Structures are given as structure tokens and as C-alpha cells.
Image: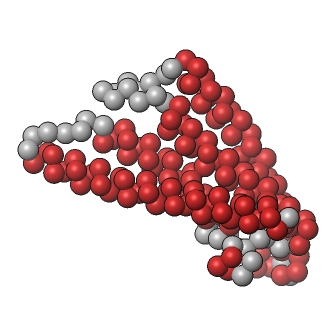
Amino acid sequence: MKTLIRLSHALNRLCGGMAIALILYMFVHIIVEIGLRFFGMSTFVLDEFVGYAVAASTFFALGYSLERDGLIRVNVVLDRIAESKRWILDLFASLLASAFFLWVGYYWWLTVARSFVRGTTSQSLAETPLWIPQGMVLIGMGMLCLTLIVRIAALICYQQAPKPAAQGA
């Protein structure tokens, strides 16, 4: 179990790094676009590529944020439950979230596969193969599902959510 938790943490750190890299890419692309426009030129793909990067970085960061308790959570109910029993509510929420994201992930997988098989491209000048940005979102969604499954297993085994190494795991 501890090996699975360490693997999940390592993969989430990697995805978190990829999210940071995408944010840096967006910054650089925007600055380049601003500079080019001073000379009456453009990359013509800023909106498209930054949009893909926003979606990918958001999904890449979800698992990382979840394992660090960085996602928004309403504690109105949790604060009224004894701390020793909160894991049950966390387990229930994690089961629901994993079921939902596995369902969405399945249909997203079908979309990515269809885009790949059909060779679907964007309607922009770049004609980006859509399976690439869709696939990045799918990877992020898969990491969120893995993180939720590891969280469920840890809640069942240890009656607490796994914490990353920096937080004492």
C-alpha cells in the first residue's frame, strides 16, 4: 500500500511540474505575441494553444491539489463530526468523486480515441490534431482517478487520507 501511495505522489509531482511548465509556456507565448504585434505580426495560434494549455494544466494539477488538500471543501458538515469519524465522510465523497470521474474519463477516452482514429484537427491555421490536447486532459483526469482510488484504499486501510512526504507521510 505504501508503494502505491509513493507512486501516486511521484506521478502527481510530475503532473504538477507539467502544469507549471504549461503555465510558463502560456506566459512566454503571450509575451512573444505582444512583442510580435508591435511589428504587425502574430503567431495566429495564441488563443487556441493557450486554451489547450489552460485545460491541460487544470487537469494535470487536480490530483496534486487533491493529495495536498488544496481543493475547495465545505467544512460545514465536517466540523460537526468527531475527528475520528471524519474519514467515513471523506471515504463517501472520494467514492462518489471517483465514480463520477471514472465515468467522465471513459467517455473522454472515447472522444480522444475517435479524434485519433478520424485524424480530427482544429479548424485553425495550425490544424492541431485534437487528440493531443484532449489526451493531455485525459492524462490529468486519469491521475485524478488514480489519486482518488489511492485515497479510498488509504481511507479503508488506515482510516485517514494519505499525506505527501512533505506533510509527514
Query: Is residue 97 visible from the viewing direction of this image?
Result: no
| Residue at screen point 38% across, 41% down | 49
Q: In the rendered image, which quarter contains the N terminus?
A: bottom right
Question: Residue 117's x, y, as percent?
Answer: 58, 20
Q: Residue furthest left?
A: 39
Q: Residue furthest top?
A: 118
| Residue at screen point 44% across, 42% down | 52
Q: In the rendered image, which quarter contains the C terminus?
A: bottom right
Image quadrant of residue 46? top left
Lateral position of residue 160 relative to residue 103, left or right: right
Query: Is residue 163 visible from the viewing direction of this image?
Result: yes
Lateral position of residue 139 relative to residue 36, left or right: right
Q: Residue furthest right?
A: 157
Image quadrant of residue 125? top left
Question: Residue 135's x, y, as percent?
Answer: 57, 38
Is residue 101 depicted above or below 152 in this figure? Answer: above
| Residue at screen point 33% across, 29% down | 126
Image quadrant of residue 37? top left
Lateral position of residue 41 relative to residue 23, left or right: left
Q: Considering depth in this image, is 151 or 101 the residue closer to the camera?
A: 151
| Residue at screen point 19% across, 51% down | 34
Lateral position of residue 143 relative to residue 91, left or right: left
